[in-house]
Amino acid sequence: MKSVFKIVWERLYLLPALHFKAYKKLIWHKNSFLHSTGWMRSLKEGIPIDSNGDPLPWMNFSFNQLLKEKLTKDLKVFEFGSGYSTLFFSGRVYSVTSIEYNKIWLEKIKRCAPENVKLIFKEKDVDGSYCRSINYTGESYDVVLIDGRDRVNCFKHSIPALSQRGVIIFDDSSRDRYLEVFDIGRKNGFKVLNIEGLQPKMRDLNRTSLFYRDGNCLGM
């Protein structure tokens, strides 16, 4: 057991000293990870943005950087769940179709969405029309982002709606209730790239998974 003296020493001196070092390296220095990625700015403004104030998907910074480098103007994107990701994609791809179950949020995004964005309202349900909405469009998509409701079923119904070069992005994939998607993906010939890191504004580790096959649109 630790002595009382050692416990007091750590609490009064060692921990404060460590916290001060962390403050100097991550918060005080303007070129630190927290500043250069936009984490500090997103914390201040309460929305997912980068250091320039441009919108980001509410996924970890490392995955967002991958998208910045790989997305091209000829891609068609489908999202389960609209938001800042919709605005992020709209400036980098050909078109974005987003499904949203929150009418108030949908109207907010509509007010700032450009012409290449199509927003569709769907009531949230389980294994119903929400997860099948991607099939109702009659189109195929190069990138599907699953970050809304009923995610496992959304994953299942996204597979036949992919283009030949299509990929699926599955956010928060570390949650136990989503483990099934890895088996489904493997059975359908997908490889998986898991990327972890901090999200804008948030403190906990986020994992986002990219499901891809050979010849995919991101060149993975």
Image: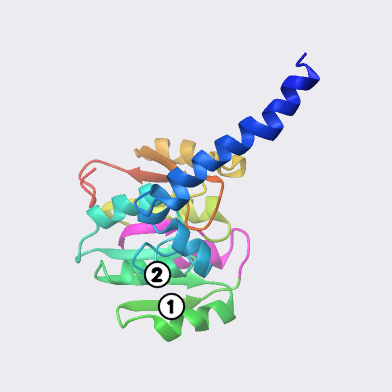
Question: Which residue was labeled with disc 1?
Answer: 119
Tell me which segment is drawn in magenta.
124-147
Foreground pick, 10 / 78 = 10
Query: Residue farthest to the right?
Result: 4
Type of residue at label 2? Thr
Q: Position of residue 163 (x, y in %)?
A: 27, 57
Secondary structure beneath dot 2 equals: helix
Foreground pick, 24 / 151 = 24
Q: How much space separates mark 1 and mark 2, taking CA atoms? A: 9 Å
Q: Nearer the viewer, mark 1 or mark 2?
A: 2
Question: Mark number for residue 107?
Answer: none
Q: Residue at x 58, y 81 (%)?
A: 104
Picture layout, residue 194 above or below residue 153:
above
Q: Residue at x 33, y 58 (%)?
A: 143
Q: Are marks 1 and 2 in contact (CB under 8 Å)?
A: yes
Q: Earlier in the sequence, mark 1 or mark 2?
A: 2
